[in-house]
Image (spheres, rainbow, N blue to C red):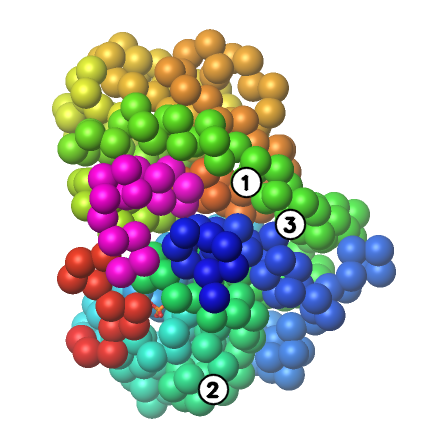
Amino acid sequence: EKGGFEHFMLKEIYEQPKVIADAVRGRMSASEGWIKLGGVSEYINRINQAKRFIITACGTSYHAGLLGEYLIEELARVPVEVEYASEFRYRNPIITENDVVLAISQSGETADTLAAIEIAKERQALIYGICNVIGSSIPRATHAGSYTHAGPEIGVASTKAFSTQVVILTLMALQIAQHKGSISTSYLRQVLYELQNIPEKIKLTLKLDAQIQEIASRFKDATNFLYLGRGVNFPVAMEGALKLKEISYIHAEGYPAAEMKHGPIALIDEQMPVVVLATNESAHDKIVSNIQEVKARKGKVIAVVNEGDVEIKALADYTIEIPATEEILSPLLTVVPLQLLSYHIALMRGTNVDQPRNLAKSVTVE
Ligand code: M6R
């Protein structure tokens, strides 16, 4: 059942090209320039008139939600708030019938996310689910939704579910943007073409596995890790840190790169591995200076860059070169080396990769 892989987690990392292709199948055409998520089409008027989106989720699904904020605000130009379901449900949130509440959950059974949905429903918002497990509780509690079609995810550390959640959020943002006319037809096509190419580019990224394993062997005994990213790569930094904590039990933090100087920079010394997500073209110079700040304090930089980035290669201790893509889609590629890095480090430390201590696949109690 592990399809020749040693662990479910590794199998699920390698399934990402296929499940992303499954997630977009029948829902878009780059050549014809259309996107159609059934749930969005069904409620398009209400969604179009919404004054605000609120995204609520836990853990990795929350990180996908943070990306949803970048995607929906950038493309569809609607204000988005992202909330941990556990906080949202207990603070008497202001929700009206003009809000769309997006609940994201792999299992569809997370207790806090379900409770957040019930509150939002009482307050008349439109509730839209993005779930993986078909027929689970969340899809049954929502007005509309889209399944991620990632197939069963067995590893407790979520990987392919995350990528497909991001794909759905991208399609959703594009479909609303197209309806509103908030992006040009040519840009829309360009993004759709790039989205279609993502599975191929993930396959190329997976070929870096041996190199990532080598990097893992250098840092397997570290006690702390810092992950830095800007813009769309900030949520990926959070996700990379969570993956490492969960399965290797190494303390890690994900930070927006520019926040480093407001505190975490004090942690940096020659022992500290700093993973920098450096693919953003729009912020390249700023990322270069963030790397210089780390190097000036002798931190060890592992940079994930676009192929051919000689400038960062000259500065970083290790560079992982991945294929370039449209910036808003880059999380679908940058997350992959981070998944592999945490997998290999955990394996080298001898932890139980698929069933880490103290964790359950779905958290059905609060
Ligand atoms: O099933 P859900 O997506 O609602 O689960 C949410 C979190 O419990 C989950 O993402 C958790 O953080 C994972 N173990 C992360 O790898």
Whole-number angstrom distance, CA of label 1 to CA of label 2:
32 Å
What number is the disc on residue 30?
Answer: none
> Mark 1 or mark 3, which has the lower sequence index?
3
Tell me which amino acid carries mark 3. Pro
Write the residue at 27% across / 27% down. 219
* Magenta span contains residue 210: no
> Mark 2 or mark 3, which has the lower sequence index?
2
Write the residue at 70% across / 66% down. 25
Question: In the visual, does 328 lie left or right of 9?
Answer: right
What number is the disc on residue 206?
Answer: 1
* Magenta span contains residue 342: yes
Residue 2 screen position, x and y as percent:
46, 61
Residue 91 screen position, x and y as percent:
19, 72
> Mark 1 or mark 2, which has the lower sequence index?
2
Badge 2 vs badge 3, beta-carbon distance below 8 Å: no
Question: In the visual, does 353 lie left or right of 154?
Answer: left
Q: Which residue is mark 2?
A: 135
Name the front one of labels 1 and 2. Answer: 1
Residue 123 figure quarter: bottom left
Asked if one can make out residue 254 in the rendered structure from this viewpoint, the answer is no
Residue 324 screen position, x and y as percent:
62, 33
Residue 257 screen position, x and y as percent:
34, 31
Name the front one of labels 1 and 3. Answer: 1
Q: Which residue is mark 3?
A: 199
Write the residue at 52% across / 59% down. 3
Q: How many marks?
A: 3
Asked if one can make out residue 244 in the rendered structure from this viewpoint, the answer is yes
Whole-number angstrom distance, CA of label 1 to CA of label 3:
11 Å
Nearer-the-camera pick, 206 or 284: 206
Q: Secondary structure at mark 1?
A: helix
Residue 171 figure quarter: bottom right
